[in-house]
Amino acid sequence: MDKLHENIRRIRFRKGYSQDEIADLMGVERSTYSNFETGRTKLFCRCMTLFAEAVGMTEEEIIMDNGPLTSGYLQAGGLEDRVDSLERKIDKLLEAVERLDKGAR
């Protein structure tokens, strides 16, 4: 969670908001928001909730976000969707390994 300030900056850019717009949506001063984004001030619980509401994401998605500026890491779905997708990929890989193993015998 050390890089939460990077996540909120990245998310703000992706959503197309200026610092002024996000600060207004959150009901805080722009300088206060700027301090959250630069890491000078920790984003405390109430402001985290306000930021999440402003950008239409859950707090968990904000914390876990590490996607590029241009597309959302979790935007296509929640954490459950990502886990399901990863499980399907693992199943396919295991099936491929099993086929290769049978072919090598």
Image (tube, grey):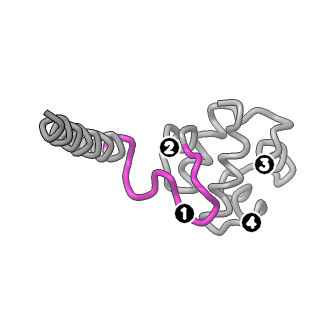
Tell which tag, 4 or 2, sits nearer the viewer: 2
Q: Disc 3 vs disc 2: which is toward the camera?
A: 2
Q: CA distance from mark 3 to mark 2?
A: 19 Å
Q: Earlier in the sequence, mark 3 or mark 2?
A: 3
> Which one is in front in this view, the residue at disc 3 or the one at disc 1?
1
Q: Is residue 69 magenta?
A: yes
Sequence-first tag of 1 and 2: 2
Where residue 103 sits: x, y (%)? 14, 41
Q: Secondary structure at mark 3?
A: helix
Q: Amino acid at mark 3?
A: Tyr
Q: Residues within 10 Å of mark 3 (few under 14, many from 20)?
A: many
Contact between labelled residues 3 and 4, with CB atoms less than 8 Å apart: no
Residue 58 is situated, as x and y percent measured from the top left of the image, at 48, 44
Give the number of the disc on residue 18. Answer: 4
Residue linked to disc 1:
71
Q: Say which mark, if any, is on residue 33.
A: 3
Using the numbered discs, state the Cα–Cα distance from disc 4 to disc 2 in whole angstroms.
Answer: 20 Å
- The magenta-colored residue range is 65-80
